[in-house]
Image: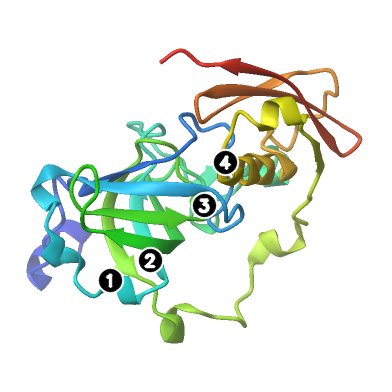
Amino acid sequence: MNVCRLAGVCGIRYAEGMKAIAYIHTDLPTKFGVPRQCGLVKALKGRIVFAAKYREPEALRGLEDFTHIWLIWQFSHAVRDEWSPTVRPPRLGGNIRMGVFATRSPFRPNFLGLSCVRLEKVDLAGREGPELLVSGVDLMDGTPIFDIKPYVPYSDSHPEAQGGFTTRLADRILHVNFPDRWRRLFSAEQQEAVVGILERDPRPRYHNDPDRVYGMPFAGYDVRFRVQDGVVEVCEMVKLEK
């Protein structure tokens, strides 16, 4: 029995025309620099603003009692008509193919992402209606969110879990040389966030050109840097046009 027939027999209804319930605002307007996983840069904050239809305080009742939430969202800049059963994870150098369902690649059949973030505050009197302030995000500015669920430690935490091919990949931390004259352009919180991103090396893993200058848009500035011998050298800051 084919899948469509089986769905009809079982009374399954697929979620057609699924709509975003909210959007997140972060200091990262492009994909470059977004942490590879949630929780890696704890200082990186986000503000979740609900779409007009879902700006209902009652929908958030009780959420303030949780410290973490799950976000189900869309890789909105990776949507395409076709998909591939295998992808090349950047952390493996971009040359080794793995099954798409064994990775967190954005190039998926439905382009859905899943992130666990810390819930800092439920703000019922936000600038645009009820808002959620979160940290440890790995989403770019404007990412659409399809659902929000509470993180439940007794069932969601699995300390014994195995990490597959990711277990053998060390989380390399680089030293960041960020001159004070440029650091001061950011708030203390933003400084911690941008350093946290840079020290984990936002470049593709297969890039190793010490003379190449990279630009990472962050909080209204293009942070330009080089990487050599395990050191990130911030060499210029350029204010971005609005």
Q: In this view, does 139 lie above or below 66?
A: above
Colour approach in the figure: rainbow
- 10 Å neighbourhood of mark 4: few (<14), some, or many (≥20)? some
Residue kind at label 3, given as amino acid type: Arg
Name the spot of residue 84 as percent of width and height, x first.
Answer: 46, 40
Residue kind at label 4, given as amino acid type: Gln
Name the spot of residue 125 as percent of width and height, x first.
Answer: 21, 53
For disc 4, the marked residue is 190
The residue located at (45%, 38%) in the rendering is 140
Element at label 2: strand
The residue located at (38%, 66%) in the rendering is 69
Between marks 1 and 2 in the image, the one whose residue lies nearer the viewer: 1
Q: State the CA–CA distance, disc 4 to disc 3.
A: 26 Å
For disc 2, the marked residue is 69
Between marks 3 and 2 in the image, the one whose residue lies nearer the viewer: 2
Between marks 4 and 3 in the image, the one whose residue lies nearer the viewer: 4
Name the spot of residue 139 as percent of width and height, x first.
Answer: 45, 44
The residue located at (31%, 71%) in the rendering is 64
Among numbered discs 4 and 3, the one appearing first in the sequence: 3
Q: State the CA–CA distance, disc 3 to disc 2.
A: 19 Å
Residue 104: numbered disc: 3
